[in-house]
Image: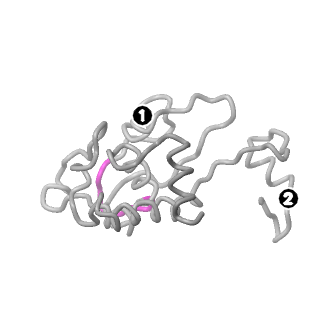
Amino acid sequence: MIAEDGLPSKKTAQKACHGAPVTSDTLFQAASVSKPVAALAALRLVESGKLSLDDDVNQYLKSWKVQENDFTKNEKVTLRGLLTHTAGMTVRGFPGYAPGESIPTTVQILNGDAPANTPPLWIQIHDGNGATRAAAMLSLSCCWKTSPACRLRNWRSNGF
């Protein structure tokens, strides 16, 4: 639901859809609402022993790695750091993509390669989107099944 002054608003919804008409079939980007879902999925993998909160995330990543720099030489990026926004990852949010725009792959987003509309991810001091990065990293690891059928089965088996 899109609200304005606490009430459903078609006008506000149309702004969120880049001016396109809003219908019952309109899809919206999940944005920050997906962060607790990604955190829950990550913690379920920790609980099952497939991931660790405190290991270097690069040991789980297959098609992309966190690049080493001055910030990561002594302190590696961990899932705990990502989920608590203390890993030092850059990029303060995502503007999303309008209908008809090319959608980048996860690796293109992380590298800042076209058609991504954000700069590459790198480590600095403060992180504002750790759960977003955790979800992206989980999707690139060997532990996360990315097919819709697997995701649906996993959510149903966990009571959702």
Q: Is residue 124 magenta?
A: yes
Label 2, on which residue? Answer: 9
Q: Is residue 132 above or below residue 3?
A: above
Q: Residue at x 44, y 53 (%)?
A: 135
Locate residue 7 relative to residue 62 in the image: left or right: right
- Across and down, in percent, residue 62 comes to 28, 40
Residue found at the far left of this picture: 74
- Across and down, in percent, residue 104 comes to 50, 33
Q: Residue at x 67, y 37 (%)?
A: 98
Given the image, on which type of amino acid does mark 1 rest?
A: Gln
Q: Residue at x 26, y 47 (%)?
A: 66
Label 1, on which residue? Answer: 108
- Across and down, in percent, residue 143 comes to 35, 49
Helix, strand or loop at label 1? It is: helix
Q: Which residues are magenta?
A: 122-129
Helix, strand or loop at label 2? It is: loop
Closest to the observer: 153 or 70? 153
